[in-house]
Image: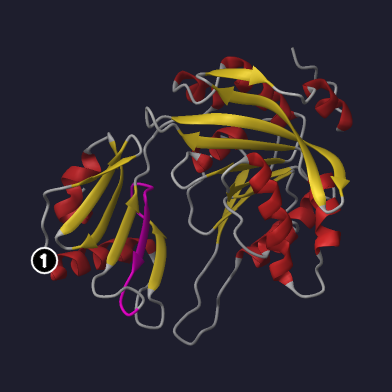
Amino acid sequence: MNEFGPLAGLMADPTIEEIWINSPHRIFIAKAGVSQLTNLVLQQQDVRDLVERLLMWGGRRLDLSHPFVDARLPDGSRLHVAIPDVTAVHWAVNIRKHLVRGKSLSNLTELKVMTPTIAEFLTRAVQAGLNILVSGSTQAGKTTLLNALVSATPVQSRVITIEEVFELKPQLPDCVALQTRQANLQGEGEIALRKLIKEALRMRPSHLVVGEIREAEALDLLIALNSGLPGMATIHANSARDAISKLQTLPLLAGENITYQFVAPLVASTIDLVVHTTILAESGERRIVEISYVTGRTEGDRVEIEPIYIFRNGEYEVGLGDPNRIFNRNGSDWAVV
């Protein structure tokens, strides 16, 4: 932990999920989803030395022409830094710790992220080749859940993962991980998510996984999955329905020739399930709170979805969606009990 310098003690604490520095005198941590101000005080140079030391390992750079950086740290944690004049005065540093939890759906069941029934349902959904969108807020456990879902793919699968920063580590024998790249000092050499999705299709994938969709790469993913290739991705959203609405909007960033009328039926025919996860306010626990089925139908420009499982008042309720119809629609022999 020498690379973390004055933050080594915080990094070693397994109950701390995230550390962020607003200024050398205001350093915060998050435990069980709740933020706390620490009594740690640094100097401005301490913060700069820490960031430079961490970036040496990640191979990313930070300067006036690139005032933001996103990088993976040696222990698997994720670093984000912003510097003036994007920030007002101080360097803003976030370290999202890589906590070794929930490598499989059964592990997440033990952590009460879901019930055994839901874990079995999701396992069957993955093995049936359904296209799954994992939604939630920041720190809600989207990447952890996605990693567990990917690990549930059949052992003979060839999975290609695409991320801005390497985070996914599925337990699979045939998996290739791809990562975006920043432009160099001359403004050349950038490799964006859209490019990686297109290249991945030439690598004989049986499953395509995008760590997070935020912009126009949503269109490339939808087109790829609409060709019969199973896949998964995460997206920031407040609910399953909001996730689908956002997925209908992001492809519009690809160009003026992409219309809402084109995207809506594409989303309806491509995505099968939306799994929404959140942090419970009363306990700080991560929990799947909704699984919804995308029926394939649209009403106007609105994609129709039906809830299958809803977490309400401390327990799961069965929604309107019929799980058996989901598997039948995809030509699967699976039956949900």
Q: Is residue 206 visible?
A: yes
Residue 169 seen in this snapshot: no
Instruction: Report which quarter residue 43 is drawn in.
Output: bottom left
Task: Provide the major secondary structure of the magenta segment.
Answer: loop
Position of 47 compared to 153: left or right?
A: left
- Residue at the limit of the structure toward the top, as seen here: 337
Q: Would you place residue 284 above or below residue 213 in this image?
A: above
Dot 1 corresponds to which residue? 43
Q: Position of residue 169 (x, y in %)?
A: 51, 42
Task: Write the start and end of the magenta stretch as one range.
Answer: 73-85
User: Mark 1: which amino acid?
Assistant: Gln
Quarter where residue 289 is shown = top right
Q: Position of residue 116 (x, y in %)?
A: 58, 16
- Measuring 24% from the left and 75% from the top, which residue is drawn there? 89
Q: Callout 1: few (<14), some (14-19), or many (20+) C-alpha neighbours within 10 Å?
A: few
Residue at 61% x, 44% y is: 175
Q: Position of residue 71 (x, y in %)?
A: 40, 60
**Residue at x 86%, y 52% (from the top left corner):** 265
Question: What x and y, as percent, mark residue 120?
Answer: 65, 19
Q: Nearer the viewer, residue 336 or 204?
A: 336
Towards the viewer: 266 or 99: 266
Numbered marks: total:
1
Choose top left, top right, bottom left or bottom right for residue 216: bottom right
Could you tell me which secondary element the residue under label 1 belongs to? loop
- The C terminus, quarter of image: top right
* Residue at 88% from the left image edge and 31% from the top image edge: 329
Using residue 217 as the reference point, say whether residue 32 is left or right of it: left
Task: In this rendered view, identify the residue nearer to me: 97 or 171.
Answer: 97
Was residue 309 drawn as part of the magenta stretch in this picture? no
Q: Residue furthest bottom?
A: 186
